[in-house]
Structure formats: C-alpha cells, structure tokens
Image (cartoon, rainbow, N blue to C red):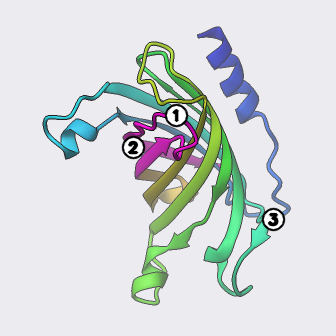
Amino acid sequence: MKITIFILILLSSVPSFSSEKKSSGYNVIGFGFYDIEKWINSGTQSDEAISFKYEKRFSRSIYNIGPESEKFFNLKPLVGFEGTSDSASYFLIGVYLEDNLGEIFIDKKSNFIFTPTLSVGYYDEGSGKKLGSNLQIRTSLEISYELKKQNRIAVSYSHTSNANTANKNPGVEILSLSYQIPF
C-alpha cells in the first residue's frame, strides 16, 4: 500500500508539457467494477473486484495524425496506475485522443467529450485475475461531461489483455466512473 501511495504522489507531481495558458490536461481519479464479463455473458467465470485508477493526461500533442484543424487527430500522452481490491496492480503509459461529441454529431460544441485511449504497461496479478503475462495492453472508450471550471465526470469501458502475446489471454473488462480535474 505504501508503494501505491508513493506512485500516486509521483505520478501526480509530473509536470504538464502544456505551454498553453488555458490548461486542458487532466488528473483522472476513478473507481469501477473489474472483470464484468459475468454481466455480459452469464455463466462465465469471473474474478470480480473493485478497480481504482489514477491517470495523468497531458495536454500537449505528441503526434498529429490528421488535418491541423482537427484536434481529434492529436495523440496526447498519459501515464497511470490501476489497482484492484484483489491487490492486482497495473502501471501504464499510453496515448489518448479526445473530441467534442456535439461537434461530431451536430456541428455545435457541447459539454460531452469522447476519449478513446490505448495504453501498455506492467501488470501484477496480486491475488486477482491471472491475465497470462505481466505485459498488458488496455483499450478504453470514455464519455465525459464537462462541468464548471473544466472539471469533468466520466464513464468508461476498458479491455485489458496481453493481446495474444502469451499462451493464455483471458483479458478483463472494466466499467469505471471518474472525476477529472484540469491542471
């Protein structure tokens, strides 16, 4: 537990790469339901647990994969930690995109933001689910609602697995809620 607290403090102290006066980087703090496979496919074995996560999402684009006018195509970095009530832990680094859902569907800005992420990291199963390897890849889809002062609340669905890089690849699905604070 002391190591987890130390890592959370370390991650939260990493400075933003942003040179903008108006910040769009976020500290993401969340909890969720780990291994919700049983909810999706009744009769399957699952190692349900509570999931806790912290991510630091930086505002500076590291790679532009589309037209300069489209902010959605800017890959931005993130680092994070995820743990479970079964003592499993996952340290991750990755990229994310984000776009305003109103601009996508009705060509008018709204408070709803769509954020897909792709991360890779080190997984320690603790007494939790065995995922076949320490190397894990996480994909996530998130929808958030922007509140006053750019704070956000969000719901996300994630899949973590070793992407068939090991003999066994059970994977795990996580449904999370988070609160996001700009820095």
Residue at left offset 20%, top offset 34%: 44
For marks 3 and 2, the one nearer the N-term is 3
Q: Quadrant of residue 84?
A: top left
Q: Is residue 113 left or right of residue 71?
A: left
Q: Quadrant of residue 47?
A: top left
Q: Position of residue 170 (x, y in %)?
A: 40, 36
Q: Tell me the SS state at disc 1.
A: strand
For marks 1 and 2, the one nearer the N-term is 1
Residue designated by label 2: 177
* Placement of the N terminus among the 4 image quadrants: top right
Between the residue at mark 3 and the residue at mark 2, the CA separation in whole angstroms equals 28 Å
Does residue 24 belong to the magenta stretch? no
Residue 6 visible in the shown view = yes
The span picked out in magenta is 155-183
Q: Is residue 70 above or below residue 55?
A: below
Q: Amino acid at mark 1?
A: Lys
Report the disc number at residue 20: 3
Q: Position of residue 74 (x, y in %)?
A: 70, 71
